[in-house]
Amino acid sequence: MSVVAPSYRRRDALPLFVEPLLAQPELHELVVAVDGSNDGSVEWLERRRETDDRLVVLDLPNRGAGATRQAGIEAASGEVVLLIDDDVIASPGLVAGHGAHHEALGPKLVLGYMPNDWTKLPPGRRGIAYTYRRAYEQHCARFARDPKFVLYGFWGGNFSMPRSELLRVGIEGLDVKRGQDDREFGIRSAKAGIRAVFDPSLRGIHLYDRGLEAWRQDCRIQGRSRRLLHDAHADMVGAKLAENPSPSHVPDAVGMGLPGPLRPIWRLLARDPLFAPASRALTTMFDAGVRMEHLGLEVQAARAIGSIETMRGVLEHA
């Protein structure tokens, strides 16, 4: 089993990521593909390699996560590749568990579980992490009910495939980011005849941590990329963001958590001239939740900010 991880400017966190993987005897190699970082990541990895030659270090020019993952897959020598993000901390047995699913090599993707622990974060970050965890758990519940949804609602960061199948499908696809790149890969995998399995016992801990501005940016990009994904794969997901999609597909219209009559208003709030004052009001609400250490208020504001930024991104690309 080869483990492949792209990494970008995470020098201080690399030991926490690398050591649990090197401690697993079933690991054949750990390929860390460094995406043009100049923060000492390559130097630390090279020093660590001196005491464990299972660690393979790729020092690459900055090209983004997709190209970096692809380079890591191409450099791997194992028959099976576990792709894991460098902010996911492997639990004991993760490598062996993935490998057991691939004893008979075939067109199969195995998705593991990677919850984040929002409770350890301070006010100002915990509400965002809670919102992310809630969305992730909703996806996982559906993964468990509907195996086809594993690919159509794909959430990467801890998954394995035979290397030959990864090369056939290709990890690089449409230039979509912040979650939709995972989903786009899942859709292409479904088109390629890949079968998917979700195994929640294959656990890693996701060190998800975002401040408000990074959260805004992530959600704005996700809105833009949702439109790109529908443009590229209308044959699979339809030409429009869906409120009532086909079975196994994702309801990805913005504002699905709102009562139906409010959804048209949300679209108006995401447009000029209402967007700026609406955004300021929601930020004031978020800041109040942080000051009072009121998790409920912080979460509601984070969800609303994320939703309006996602809608703004959709409208920018429309």
Image (cartoon, grey):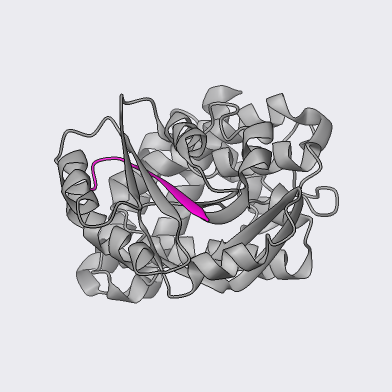
Vertical relation: 235 (above or below) 84: above
Q: Position of residue 200 (x, y in %)?
A: 60, 72
Q: Where is residue 279 in the image (x, y as percent from the top left)?
A: 37, 43
Q: Does the magenta stretch include residue 110?
A: no
Vertical relation: 114 (above or below) 47: below
* Point 53% across, 45% down: residue: 179
- Is 3 situated left or right of 225 in this image? left
Q: Is the magenta stretch mostly helix, strand or loop?
A: strand
Q: Does the magenta stretch include residue 9?
A: yes
Span colored in magenta: 1-10
Vertical relation: 153 (above or below) 121: above
Q: Where is residue 306 in the image (x, y as percent from the top left)?
A: 45, 49
Q: Which of 254 and 251 is in front in this view?
A: 251
- Is 127 situated left or right of 164 in this image? left
Can residue 47 be seen?
Answer: yes
Can residue 251 be seen?
Answer: no
Quarter-wise, where is residue 248 in the image?
bottom right
* Quadrant of the snapshot with the C terminus: top right
Q: Which of 314 and 121 is in front in this view?
A: 121
- Is 172 situated left or right of 58 in this image? right
* Point 21% across, 57% down: residue: 51
* Point 25% across, 59% down: residue: 287
Q: Where is residue 230 in the image (x, y as percent from the top left)?
A: 70, 31
* Point 72% across, 41% down: residue: 189
Q: Nearer the viewer, residue 40 or 229?
A: 40
Quarter-wise, where is residue 292 in the image?
bottom left
